[in-house]
Image (tube, rainbow, N blue to C red):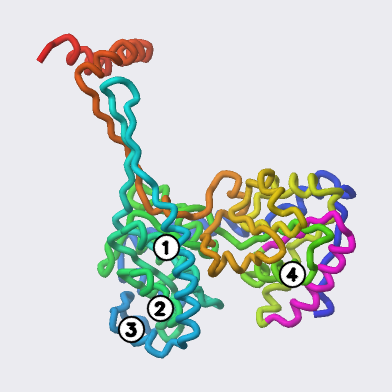
Amino acid sequence: MSELQIPIEQWQSLSEAEQAQRLARPGRAQAESLREKVSVILSDVRDNGERAVLNYTREFDNPEATSLRMSSEQVDAAIAGLDDKIKRAINTAYQTIYRFHEAQRPQNLSIETAPGVQCELRYTPLDAVGLYIPGGSATLPSTALMLGVPAQITGCQRVVMVSPPNKQGELPAALLYAAKCCGVTDILLCGGAQAIGALAYGIESSPAVGKVFGPGNSFVTEAKQQVSQNDSGCAMDLPAGPSELLVIADDSANPAYVAADLLSQAEHGPDSQVILLTPSMAVAENVRQELIAQCAQLSRADIAEQALQASRLLVVSDMNEAIAISETYAPEHLSIQTDNARELLPQLTRAGSVFVGHYTPESGGDYATGTNHVLPTYGYARNYSSLGLVDFYRRYTVQEASQDGLRQLAEAITTLADVEGLDAHKRAVTIRTENKP
């Protein structure tokens, strides 16, 4: 690991073009090719249903797959031997996540906007939702909790979890235990764009859902975007790509803590990105040394090292500059490791989730502090929110006018209808006000 090169750069010594390049995310390779490949997969699933998804599952995951749906007996058998320590950890995380999301229940609203005119805002849970849990090199029961708990609290009647099986056609017992805690109703053994197609269009063993949730690779993200734009598809939660973390640190920061947090995101995947902003050259140098030393000890050191190649250690002139850079970058995760961390919060609003102080590791939010770890990435934190309970509801409005209430608003409505040249709109009012019942 001694070959790992992590340069430290002075922000003010960089040109505008160089500064923009340092904040650029890892490229999305072959975007047009990706769109075409995903489109072909989704069309196949839409036209051929379960048979198509099974074929892709055999090709990419389990060559011997004969069915997609897991029975409750299979789930129970898989989790029977799960270590009690793992169960306790999942139970603890479940409780904190549940507590935080339970407090987010929206309230229906009713208000008289004018005499005799009542307007309401109402919330109703989505009937059926799909939860995508990535597979591959990591087991992710935490993602099942982050998606499953709000679906459970909201009261979604059908909750379908999809995740790619291993070559033996199995899912991790910890993942299945988390799903059971959340009351997931259906589990399908499939992943990738084909799993998103199965959720969006429905297959023989599992009807279509109304909205898909969860992070995934570029194929999954592209598939979510395509089905959300298709009139026969479904809605999606938010754009969620490679993981990223930005740390703002001053002289009070512990370099070992900072490095550990940066590596906790770097180990997610080779396309993850981590950035340090500090006004202290000494902090930057000490963090660099810690990164090299700690990375060498990781089981996923090769992955983390690749991610660090697209990561940055930037020395800024002061905290104001660090704040401005962070707001421009809009990170998925933002860690503030300064002696006045909470005081900076009002100025740092463009982030998916913020971690305040020296004793708030980013991994806490990934697992068990209670906040949701499904967050906007790639700069979407400028315009998108972290996943929350309200995402599992559909809201709609109700209005009711009395006869007198309509009469009082009639002039405003008919005048605006005249302005817009919509005679039928005007007539819908006058036919009621000109003729007494």
Residue at left offset 57%, top offset 59%: 241
Circle nearer the N terminus (3, 2): 3
**Lower position in the chain sequence, tag 3 or tag 1:** 1
- Choose mark 2 or mark 4, whichever is in front: 4
In space, the residues marked 3 and 2 are separated at their CA atoms by: 8 Å
Queried whether the magenta region covers residue 396, the answer comes back as: no
Q: Which residue is mark 1?
A: 41
Disc 4 to disc 1, how far (Cα)?
43 Å
Q: Which residue is mark 2?
A: 177
Which kind of residue does numbered mark 4 sit on? Tyr
Q: Secondary structure at mark 4?
A: helix
Name the quadrant of the N terminus. bottom right
**Marks 1 and 2, how far apart at CA:** 30 Å
Q: Nearer the viewer, residue 50 or 76?
A: 76
| Label 2 vs 4, first from the N-terminus | 2
- The disc, 4 or 1, on the residue closer to the chain's N-terminal end is 1
- The amino acid beneath tag 2 is Tyr
Does the residue at mark 3 contact the one at mark 4 (Cβ under 8 Å)? Answer: no
Q: CA distance from mark 2 to mark 4?
A: 31 Å
10 Å crowding of disc 3: few (<14), some (14-19), many (20+): some
What residue sits 47% from the left and 59% below the top? 100
Q: Helix, strand or loop at disc 1? A: helix
Relative horizontal placement of residue 426, taking residue 249 as reference (left or right): left
Q: Which mark is residue 76?
A: 3
Amino acid tagged 3: Asp
- At 38% across and 55% down in the image, what residue appears? 211
